[in-house]
Amino acid sequence: MVTMTSAPFEYEKPESVAEASRLLSKYGGNGKLLAGGHSLVPLMKLRLASPDALIDLSGINDLKGIKSTANGLSIGSMTTYHELESSSDVQSGAPLLADAASQVADTQVRNFGTIGGAVSHSDPASDLPPVVLALDATMVTGSQRSGREIPADRFFKDFLTTALRPNEVLVRIDIPKLPANTGTAYVKMANKASHYALVGVAAVITLGAGGVCERARVALTGAGPHAVRARRAERILEGKVLAGNVIRNASKRVGAELDGMFNEDVHASAEYREAMTQVYAERAITAAVANAG
Amino acid sequence: MTTAKLGEAVRRIEDDRLITGRGKYVDDVKLAGMLHLALVRSPHAHATIKNIDVSAAAAVPGVETVFTGADLQEQMGSLPAGWVLEDMVAPDHPPIAFEKVRVVGDAVAAVVADSAAAAADAAQLVDVTYDVLPAVVDAEKATQSGAPQLHEDAKNNVAFNWDVHGGDYSEAAKSAEVVVKQRIINQRLIPNPMETRGVVADYDIGSDHLTVYSSTQIPHLMRLLFSLVTGHPEHKLRVIAPDVGGGFGCKLYLYAEEIIAGIIAKNLGRPIKWTEGRQENYVATTHGRDHIADVEICGNKDGTITGLKAHIYANLGAYLSTFAPGIPTVLFGLMLSGQYKIPNISCDVTGVFTNTTPVDAYRGAGRPEATYLVERMVDRFAQEIGRDPVVVRRKNFLAPFKNGKEVATGVNYDSGNYRGVLNKALEIFDVKEFRDQQRAARREGKLLGVGFSTYIEICGMAPSAVAAALGAGAGLWESSTVRVHPTGKVTVLTGTSPHGQGHETSFAQIVSSTLGVPMEDVDVLHGDTDRQQFGTGTFGSRSLAVGGQALMMSLRKVMDKATKIAAHELDADPKMVQFADGVFRLEDIPEKELPFGDVALAAHSAVNLPPRMEPGLEETSFFDPENFTWPFGAHICVVEIDEATGETKVAKYVAVDDIGNVINPMIVDGMVHGGIAQGIGQALQEGAVYDDDGQLLTGSMLDYAVPTAEDVPSFITDRTVTPTKVNELGAKGAGEAGTIASSPAVINAVVDALKHLGVNHIDMPLRSESVWRTIQDAKEAQRAKRSAARKGS
């Protein structure tokens, strides 16, 4: 039952996205992309995952690097959490992403784990999915033939499931430039053991004249089967001056998209996750408003 | 060339190799021809084994052979309970289950292959057919009629009933003004040493010598038990505990894997290695605590406590581990007087089998459970009568004593000054200032609380005759050898077996300060039964108090002989010889001097020794203490609670301990820090959780929250010194104090933060949800009360 060694597997190290895609096709559903491995390898050691092949993406230059453009940031999918948190381009262009990356696990994980690996895994309690949702990011993919651009809010489909096709590789994440007077925040209640989010809320708030909320993006992780945009809460915030009671009312609707299906496990009941979603949403939105000011 | 003094914060000698990856642990042992062992473990908590098909596993390339329990049972025997209570039921515990499994993780087959990976691959292919039986994981439920029965000979799953009574509790309760009752859960913990267990067994068929490397705290006891169980002769059995990466008590036993690896090595004539995985460790290595306690405390409104009564369901797990029966009984029940004069104490303990991993000692072992119960109930009592918990403690403290004090449980404390240690803590921590902060914070919606824990512990295991009378199956004395080499260098052999405690440093300090030799000229060797003739090992904060004294006795003998040799060389009466800074001198002719090293050489050259003196300079001593030692202290904890979420943080922690004389204050501080962190871990976040089918839901570090640096504040530590007379070092033992004291300090602080809401108890661990729920429920109760009052008026 309990082992420390994985089942045997092949190891592939492609040098291009097309080659990685070809290898995915070759192994059918039994090839797994290795993009940091901090979720995958532990599962393999427990033999909860036993892929025929690991396709290591670390040799593909197209997946690396952070570029700052006139439109925003373009972040290679193999960018590590550590690179995100320490990049001055990310700190100034998307401070939400730098901050959330700094809250992931521990130093060792942040040195290996990547943004592409995190969002493609779609772990329900992962920190970066709500961040790319709140930042209106675009997921740019590649395959043997051509690539696609998938808006973040159509990317996360279900528990450990994304819109990526079986032979598709996430190439980069494009993050549009934030409008002026925009504040952001990510707050989470961390599981004491794993540091995954019991609940985590990302908020991006743009204020207009007279302090009216022009644009609100709120996204939630940890509470349901996958990260979700809190559109109903966003609608309550937009067009209003964000007094405490408005934020509180909106926070009560964060999680409405889950239709009452909050996660429940040994660490927290569904009832508690629901209550904490509201508390943390209020804190995230309040902090984002303060940052926008 | 530096000599060290007692009481000096010498840096740990062993750390250089341990933190630069040069330590040698069991998994670093690689022998020619070595095979690897993987164990097939039961996924069910309770089941009958119908069939085991090993054919697919045996066909895996690299697999040497696959054994089932039936194949090896006659050679392996049954794992023993080394602590025997009166009328105790000790059922068979086969190292490999062969008829029935009783816990998830019971070994059912052993796969041997030429690599660890091949063994793991093949283990997956062993096909076991089970007939699954209902399971029970809760100790109280296991005793009820209709509960699944684990062992035929243990009716209602009860292994033993144990009790201790002093005075007359029921009379005390009858005449008391106040009786407070409380159910208290002390949850199950997983010890989590940094190094999991591991075994390498190496058999030499020509000499019939079997060598077992094991990550153990007790090489000699393990050898003795291994020999008794398997029949392998003790003098042809060598147990080596190389560097051991922590234990916290969970490496204090004879384990199934040691026998399995040893017996397979004998069968195959090749070395066998087994290395435990972390998840495997969570099910196959002992757990700690797990008490359900129903407690009563009684006394008067002036704060006098007159009695304490407790009934405990102690969860023992599926089998009796080596010391298991002694932990929730002797090391728990006899401690229930704490630092207080409580004339009437009554304690009954029911030890219960359940379909869970066996429970045995975990850092503190019985004493944290006792301290938690006593300190929680003292606070509960103070709250009930509306008095300050510090005032109630002071009112009931035993007055300072130096020459022993017997308490109602029948034990005799060695020395104590409980007021003194609390006063020192209160000099460091200003309670009045804190109360002002607490009130101010509450007005801003922030919850602060302070908790006190004034604890006592029992260390220096142990006077052998007393321990034997209480059920211990082995003498608990300690041994030492001091071997002075011709060049004046010194080798120390100790029967203690450190696994993180720093004996190589603190024992060398004792040698250096006594013989005047530099620290680097002393080598402390431990953990090899072929080197040290016998020893009991390291546990129960005993190494310095018992092993250190054994060392002192050998050093005295060495000095005695060296002084005679020096006197002979200097042509003087030994009474005229003085010794200081490593040099022998004559009182009246100070220029005539002889360094210690010259005496060592003289002892070995044997050219000019006193008449009839044997050559050489080596002495061995055995020390059996006349009493335990009884460290004590006062800890103060401040918590901050986020009222909206229940998240609880330890904001400040003051620990004042009295462990007698201190050899190395840096090492003691380190032990206190680690201990407090573990106690805070129990209070706030640790806890093994099983579902009703006996599956461990907290089966890995992703779900079991071991505390880290971010979970604890910077500790403020200090000490008072009340030496013991039990050993000439005056040292009492420091390894467990932090763990024993801290859990109740944290919980008392949380209750203090919430008592304005009417909260008077909350069970560990304080996961944020349980604190949040407690706050919600308390507020709801207050609302209901107010509404009822309105309706009434």
Image (cartoon, coloured by chain):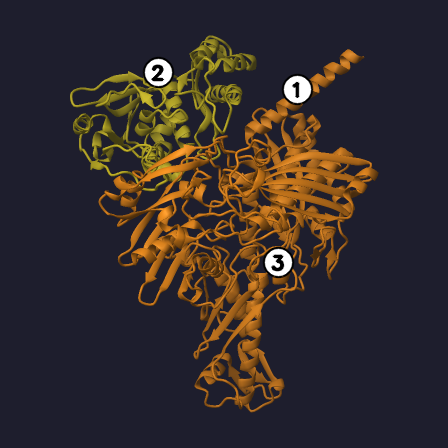
Chain colours: A yellow, B orange
Residue B241 x %, y % = 43, 58
Residue B251 appears left or right of A114: right
Quick check: marks 3 and 1 in contact, CB under 8 Å?
A: no
Q: Chain of mark 1?
A: B
Vertically, is B308 above or below A99? Answer: below
Labels 2 and 1 within one chain: no
Pointer 2: what residue? A153
Pointer 1: what residue? B780
Residue A68 appears left or right of B570: left
Labels 3 and 2 within one chain: no
Residue B713 appears left or right of B302: left
If you read the primary sequence from the N terminus, does the residue marked by circle 3 or circle 1 appear first? Answer: 3
Vertically, is B640 above or below B489? Answer: above
Q: How many marks?
A: 3
Q: Amino acid at mark 2?
A: Asp
- Residue in view at x 34 percent, y 58 percent: B266
- Residue in view at x 18 percent, y 33 percent: A14
Q: Amino acid at mark 3?
A: Ala
- Residue B712 in sight in this render: no
Q: Residues within 10 Å of mark 1 (few under 14, many from 20)?
A: few
Residue B505 appears left or right of B755: left
Residue B639 x %, y % = 61, 36
Query: Which of the image's four quarters has the C terminus of chain B?
Result: top right
User: What's the CA distance linking mark 3 and mark 2?
Assistant: 68 Å
Q: Nearer the viewer, residue B414 or B60?
A: B60
Q: Chain of mark 2?
A: A
- Residue A116 in sight in this render: yes
Residue B599 x %, y % = 49, 82
Q: Chain of mark 3?
A: B
Residue at disc 1, secondary structure: helix
Pointer 3: what residue? B467
- Nearer to us of marks 2 and 1 is 1
